[in-house]
Image (cartoon, rainbow, N blue to C red):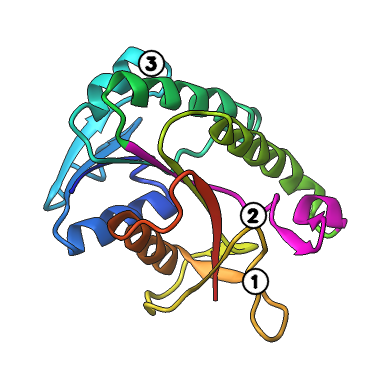
Amino acid sequence: MNVVVYGATGNSGSEIVKELVRRGHKVTGVARHVEKLKDQPGVTAKTDHLSNVDAIAAVIKGADVVVSAYQPPADNTDALVDVTKRQIEAVKKAGGPRLVVVGGAGQLEVAPGVTVIKSGHLPQEYMPIALSHEKAAQVLKGSDINWTYIAPAAFFIPGERTGKYRTGTNNLVMDGKGESKITFADYAIALVDEMEKPKHERALFSVGY
């Protein structure tokens, strides 16, 4: 498949790029600064700032799947919402590739009707980005494109590629000890598995151990 990855030099984006290349997909890595991508075998590097719908559409035209691993600035997390809106419009202009979004865990339920955001356990410093991810997911849900939103575990961390993961729907995936985590590398496996064999088109699902 022809896949465009936005945020290709970030924590999750870089692992997604590696996983796609490992499986033989045609990969275009997009970021503000692409120096890290230029010498990476199997990756075409492109620069884009996600600030213009027409520019995004030009980058993604001809793609089968667009992956968004965009990370907004810490002092303006709602930039994520505006970027999501532009990506949706760009997907329409580019002929309708599938949009797969690296999401957040804040809106996932830890008990029936109780999300991570509402639970009182989310540290205050993570609240702005959690709320912005929730808003961006709502924008996707209201769109008419083919989207998939993949929410990671509570702890989304560096670590080894084990090839193991479990999925949920709108629930936070936790292990038998009540811990919720996933490495960037194993999250990337889950994302590419979903891309290759879709099970959650126009839907949100969660990933963890």
Q: Circle 3 sits on which residue?
A: 53
Which range of residues does the magenta coloring cover?
A: 98-120
Q: Nearer the viewer, residue 121 or 63?
A: 63
First-in-chain label (2 vs 1):
2
- SS at mark 2 in the image: loop
User: Where is residue 25 shown, x and y percent of the image?
Assistant: 16, 53
First-in-chain label (2 vs 3):
3
Q: What is the number of the mark on residue 180? A: 1
Q: Circle 2 sits on which residue?
A: 105
102 inside magenta stretch: yes
The residue shown at (67%, 40%) is 134
Q: Amino acid at mark 2?
A: Ala
Q: What is the number of the mark on residue 169? A: none
109 inside magenta stretch: yes
Q: Where, quadrant-wise, is the C terminus in this rendering?
A: bottom right
The residue shown at (66%, 30%) is 75
- Residue 30 lies, with reference to residue 85, above or below; the image says below
User: Where is residue 183 shown, x and y percent of the image?
Assistant: 48, 68
Q: Amino acid at mark 3?
A: Val
Left or right of 83, for residue 115: right
